[in-house]
Image (spheres, rainbow, N blue to C red):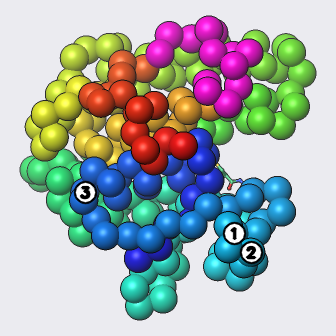
Amino acid sequence: MKLYYTPLACSLADHIALNEAGAAFERESVDLVTKKTASGGDFRAVTPKGYVPALVLDDGEVITENIAILDWLAGEFPVLGQPGRLGRTRVLEALTFISTEIHRAFKPMWHAGSETQKARARATISGLFEEVSGGRRATTCSATGRASPTSTCSSCCCGRAASASSCRRRLPHCAAAWPPVRPCRPPCATRACFH
Ligand SMILES: N[C@@H](CCC(=O)N[C@@H](CS)C(=O)NCC(=O)O)C(=O)O
């Protein structure tokens, strides 16, 4: 399979998950402005949406949307998910919250929002991170033994939270505005797939 990604974009979640699972995969970066892939291909031919992440399976099927990709990966590589009757549901619950609430809340930062909109977004994001990290209660992922930044211990959720928060590295002016999510072990920023 092949992951189309952009460094520090939300495709980081899938990149982390693939690495954590020990999956064999190819990867190719995408310039989100020109929609060209690193090898000069047209990314819109891979997915007309033009959004990363996109995961191309060995049979040619293309999966887009973080939640769908991470859920598919957790099915293929159970170490990424959570066991139990509600395991998959809890992972989807956390992924949906991160995708629809946290990721969306960053928009004023990316799309030249006004200073007022950015200040409002920072306050919202602080609260949302607090929520997703379970009020900073210690959570250790039962699968990997690592500390998880989400109250749901799953590499999928951990990676998705990391990718939502990676914006702090891209947007230094908002870095100090909210407390860091409890770091993963090893810290996400030291992972090869972060760059
Ligand atoms: N709904 C998509 C959103 C993906 C998304 O927003 N990707 C951004 C990077 S984080 C992107 O590719 N943006 C390209 C663009 O806006 O043209 C998902 O959750 O996977």
Amino acid at dot 1: Thr
For residue 5, what is the image quadrant? bottom right
Q: For marks 2 and 3, give the one nearer the viewer.
A: 2
Q: Is residue 10 above or below residue 4?
A: above
Point 43% across, 54% down: residue: 15
Residue 170 in sight from this viewpoint: yes
* Residue count near mark 1 (Cα–Cα under 10 Å), binned few <14, some 14–19, many ≥20: some
**Taking 105 as reference, is 183 above or below it?**
above
Left or right of residue 76, residue 110 in this image: right
Instruction: Say if the magenta span includes residue 52.
Output: no
Dot 2 and dot 3 residues touching (CB under 8 Å): no
Q: Provide the residue designation for mark 3.
A: 21
Is the C-beta separation of discs 1 and 2 under 8 Å?
A: yes
The residue wearing badge 1 is 37
Give the position of the C terminus as an image quadrant: top right
Residue identifier under label 2 = 40
Q: Residue at x 34, y 14 (%)?
A: 135
Q: Quadrant of residue 51?
A: bottom right
| Residue range (magenta) | 168-180
